[in-house]
Image (spheres, rainbow, N blue to C red):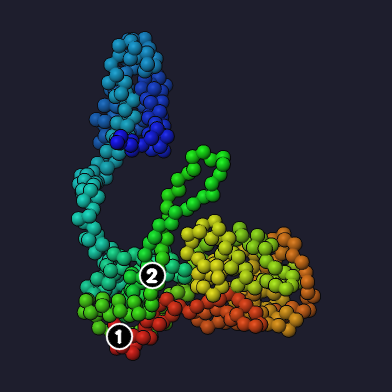
Amino acid sequence: MTKQPRYSKDHPVVAFFALLLFFVFLDFYMSAIPTANKLSQYIAVIKTLNTFLPEGQKYYVLAMDYLENAIATAQALGVKDPLAFVVRGGDLKILVLSWASKYVLTFGAVYGFLYKVGFFWVLVPAVLGGLFIVKNSSRFLPYLMWLKAFWLAPIKDLQVLRLVLVHLANPVPASITHHNPREGGLLDHSLRVARIALEIGSPLDRKALVLAALLHDIGKIRLYRKEKVQKVSAPSPIVVKPEKKKPVERWVSLEVNQKVVNMVTIREISKRFGIVLPQEVWPVIAEADRKAVKEELKQGVYNVGKYVKEVLAELEYVKPKKDGWRVGDYVFVLAHAFNRRLTLKLLKDDPTLPLDPEPTAVGVHMVAYSVVADKSVPLVWEYEGKKADSLGLFDVKVKGTLFKAVYCFDLTKINLDVPQMIKEEELEVLERGDQPEGEEAANSEDTQGSGVSATPSSVEGVGEGGKSLQGEGGA
């Protein structure tokens, strides 16, 4: 059985190195024997360097010697290009050194600068030490993680450092379809909860608050796993050799009871590290968790402005199903219908996004906050003296029926034709007012209308695990 070659002739790596060699040869051919004009430029540069960075003079002289030797030999042979130089019997070494002279000159300038500022002898051991650490990274990784944990820890305490290390060793997201859905998101979220818990001003011990914040969702290190997803493209009769797409990775959650796993993991780690927390700490962490989720969701991580016109054009404005109504130059659309279609557009462009298009799933809230964060979305924030809430939402009454959580868009800024099926006096806009903290995106789907569904942060955080633990005497 013959051994297959590692790289075929059409491999991208082979093409890259072939192109690199071509440009190196081209540069060599054009600069190995400098012209008189090029030589005068070198002389001017060397004079300037000698004035400001005289410490690199030996390298400047060396570069100049290489150039002068190549010019003198070329003149003696009566040639002007490297090929004729070699054919006439010239030494190839002279050409190589002449071509390398510019790099020697550059090195001299760098050497002069470093020597002048006194860093050279410090830099060399540092570079060598860095190379040694990189080469033996597996040996130094635990020490580097300890340094990172010390840097990140809100309180420099051994138990706190060990909990941060647990997070660093298991960089899972805080959620797959809600807040912080990225690798390492759980640690970022837990540190944010710790910061907010300390800011609340609770009379509880600061160390206890930080430990509880780092523990409150730690069961997720057992729940979340990465799996590879192979993108498959439809076959085409035109494509002779289909493109091989690299598999992408996405986070998945184990089908288990998350509350139980979280509670058991908190107990196990607390016992292992000797952590004993008072019951009173969990309500404070629950409040900090809600505020942290609120901050993280408001960041708005998706650019959705480019989809607005397309989504509005696809919504239904006639019976029996209605997603919105036009009144004059404005169109009012149910937020749950708009965000669902918007989520589907995002997923069509990238199926691996941590989103769920269903309005009852938490994943849609990242899109709801993105609608607010993306300044290109032409939301109307005030209509006839009525102001939208923090998510750009109104409540409206259409022919006496109340619909909650409705967006308003200005059609003059979108250039879209929407049928007008009701009269202006048949639609009344209401202010939603301030929503309960942590529930700005919440809405109720009832017989009167629908909106952007939200699940309180307790679904994924300490709101549930923490309450259960209070009755158990803490972690």
Using the image, determine if residue 95 lies above or below residue 152. above
Location of mark 2 (residue): 254
Q: Which mark is residue 474?
A: 1
- Which element is circle 2 on? loop
- Residue 8, position as x, y percentages in the image: 38, 35
- The residue at 72%/69% (across/down) is 317
- Is residue 168 found left or right of 248 in the rendered image? left
Q: Amino acid at mark 1?
A: Gly
- Residue 97, position as x, y percentages in the image: 29, 24
Dot 2, crowdedness within 10 Å: few (<14), some or many (≥20)? few
Between discs 1 and 2, the one toward the N terminus: 2
Q: Amino acid at mark 2?
A: Leu
Asked if residue 420 can be seen in this view, the reply is yes
Query: Given the current orientation, which residue lies at the most extreme bottom position?
Result: 471
Using the image, determine if residue 227 lies above or below residue 285. above
Q: Quadrant of residue 375?
A: bottom right
Q: Nearer the viewer, residue 251 or 167?
A: 251
- Is residue 150 found left or right of 230 in the rendered image? left
Using the image, determine if residue 436 lies above or below residue 28. below
Query: Given the current orientation, which residue lies at the most extreme front position?
Result: 1
Asked if residue 285 can be seen in this view, the reply is no
- Residue 267, position as x, y percentages in the image: 27, 80
Q: Quadrant of residue 62?
A: top left
- Which element is circle 1 on? loop
